[in-house]
C-alpha cells in the first residue's frame, strides 16, 4: 500500500499537506478540523511585530508622554504573545500533528525573544515569515540577505526546534540565498510568501487592496524555484506555497522537489475537506504508479540533472517558442478544464 507520509524540516508528517499561516489556523477548533481532514501539520497564524507597533502607536496618539508609548508597546506585545502562547499550548493538548509557530518581525532581538517563548510553549518548529520590500537606496546590495542569514544563525543557536524561512519572491539569487540559509542552520524554506497586493481604483483615483487570494498561475514560479533550490542545495527541506489547487498540483510539487505543500486559498474557498481529497488523489496516483513511498518519486524532476536544470533556468520566452511552428498562444493553450480558464 502507498505511504503518503514525508519528512519536512526534520518533522515526520503523515501527509505532505500543511495548512499555511492564516486566519485558518488562529483557533483550536480550526486546527482540529484540519487534523481530522488529514493535514500533516499546521502553521499557526503569524505574530506581526509591525502590527503590534501600529496598535500601540494608535492607542498612544492622544498622549504627549514618550513613556506612554513604551508602556503601551509592552502592554500590546505582552497580550499578543500571551494569546499566542495559550493557542500553542491548547493546540498541543488537542492535536497530535506538528504545530509550527510563525513570526514576522523586523528587529533581530525581537525575532529571538519571540522564538524562544513560542518554543517554550510547545511549538514543534519556528517559521520565520519574511515579508519585506527593500526601498532604502542607501543600503548596499545584498545587505538584507546577509542580515537575514545572520539572524537565522542566531535563532538556530538559541532554540532547540527546526527553523524554517518563508521567503517572498523579491530576492535576486534564490539559489545562493537558500544555500546560505542552510549553511546558517535553517532546516527548510517555504517558497513563496504571498504579500499584500495593492491595486488602483481609476474612478476614485485611490490605492485599494488587490486580490488577497493566490492564482493557479502562481504555482509555476514556485515549481521553478523549488526545483532549482533542490538541485543546488539538496539537503535543504522545501515547502512549496502559492497556487496549489488540485491533487495534480501536489504531485507536481513533490516531483519538483518539495517535501511539503502549504495550502491557504484553496481551504478558504472550499473548506478543510479539500485536504482529504488531495491526500486521496496523491494516494491513488501512487498506487497506480506503484510507488510505495513519497521518497520514491520526490525530486525526480528537480534540477538535479543538467538537462532539467537548463529547462528550469530558461528565462527567454520567445527563444523557447521560436522552435515551434505554432504561435506561443496556440502552443501553450491550456485544456478546457484547466483552472486558469476561470480567471
Image (cartoon, rainbow, N blue to C red):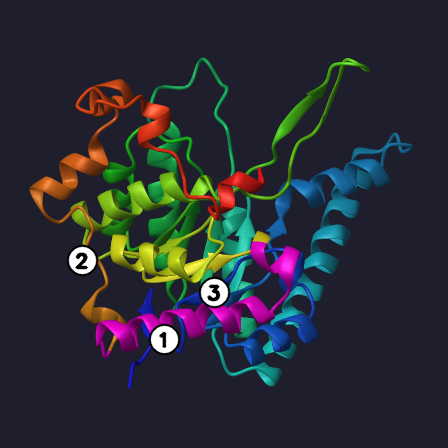
Q: Element type at marker 1? A: helix
Q: Between marks 1 and 3, how big is the CA–CA gap?
A: 16 Å
Residue 148 x, y percent position in the rendering: 39, 40
Give the secondary structure at mark 3.
strand
Residue bounds of the magenta highlight: 266-292
Marked residue nearer the N-terminal end (1 or 3) = 3
**Residue 341: in magenta span:** no
> Where is mark 1, residue-wise?
283
Residue to which mark 2 is pinned: 300
* Residues at marks 2 and 3, CA–CA distance in whole angstroms: 21 Å
Mark 1–mark 2 Cα distance, whole angstroms, equals: 17 Å
Which numbered mark, 2 or 3, is in the foreground of this view?
A: 2
Q: Residue at x 33, y 46 (%)?
A: 223
Quadrant position of residue 198: top right
In this picture, is 136 found above or below 230? above
The residue at which mark 3 appears reads as 18
User: The C terminus is located in which quarter?
Assistant: top right
Of 324 and 204, nearer the camera is: 324
Amino acid at each position: 500500500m502507498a505511504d503518503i507520509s514525508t519528512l519536512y524540516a526534520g518533522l515526520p508528517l503523515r501527509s505532505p499537506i500543511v495548512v499555511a499561516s492564516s486566519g485558518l489556523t488562529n483557533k483550536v477548533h480550526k486546527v482540529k478540523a484540519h487534523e481530522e481532514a488529514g493535514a500533516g501539520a499546521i502553521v499557526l497564524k503569524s505574530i506581526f511585530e509591525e502590527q503590534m507597533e501600529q496598535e500601540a502607536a494608535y492607542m498612544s496618539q492622544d498622549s504627549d508622554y514618550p513613556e506612554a508609548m513604551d508602556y503601551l508597546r509592552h502592554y500590546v506585545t505582552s497580550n499578543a504573545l500571551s494569546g499566542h502562547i495559550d493557542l500553542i499550548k491548547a493546540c498541543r493538548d488537542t492535536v497530535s500533528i506538528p504545530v509550527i509557530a510563525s513570526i514576522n518581525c523586523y528587529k533581530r532581538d525581537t525575532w529571538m525573544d519571540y522564538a524562544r517563548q513560542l518554543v517554550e510553549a510547545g511549538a514543534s518548529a519556528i517559521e520565520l515569515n519574511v515579508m519585506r520590500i527593500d526601498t532604502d537606496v542607501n543600503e548596499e546590495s545584498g545587505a538584507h540577505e546577509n542580515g537575514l542569514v545572520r539572524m537565522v544563525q542566531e535563532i538556530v543557536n538559541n532554540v532547540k526546534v527546526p527553523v524554517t524561512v518563508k521567503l517572498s519572491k523579491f530576492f535576486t539569487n534564490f539559489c545562493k540565498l537558500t544555500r546560505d540559509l542552510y549553511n546558517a542552520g535553517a532546516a527548510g524554506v517555504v517558497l513563496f510568501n504571498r504579500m499584500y497586493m495593492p491595486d488602483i481604483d481609476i474612478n476614485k483615483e485611490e490605492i485599494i487592496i488587490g486580490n488577497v487570494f493566490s492564482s493557479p498561475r502562481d504555482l509555476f514560479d514556485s515549481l521553478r524555484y523549488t526545483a532549482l533550490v533542490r538541485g543546488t542545495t539538496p539537503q535543504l527541506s522545501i515547502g512549496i506555497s502559492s497556487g496549489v489547487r488540485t491533487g495534480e498540483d501536489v504531485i507536481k510539487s513533490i516531483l519538483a522537489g518539495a517535501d511539503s505543500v502549504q495550502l491557504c486559498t484553496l481551504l478558504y474557498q472550499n473548506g478543510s475537506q479539500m485536504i482529504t481529497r488531495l491526500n486521496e488523489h496523491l494516494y491513488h496516483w501512487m498506487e497506480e504508479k506503484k510507488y510505495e513511498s513519497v521518497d520514491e518519486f520526490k525530486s525526480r524532476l528537480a534540477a538535479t540533472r543538467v538537462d532539467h536544470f537548463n529547462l528550469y533556468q530558461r528565462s527567454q520566452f520567445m527563444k523557447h517558442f521560436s522552435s515551434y511552428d505554432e504561435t506561443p498562444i496556440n502552443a501553450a493553450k491550456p485544456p478546457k478544464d484547466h483552472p486558469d480558464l476561470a480567471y
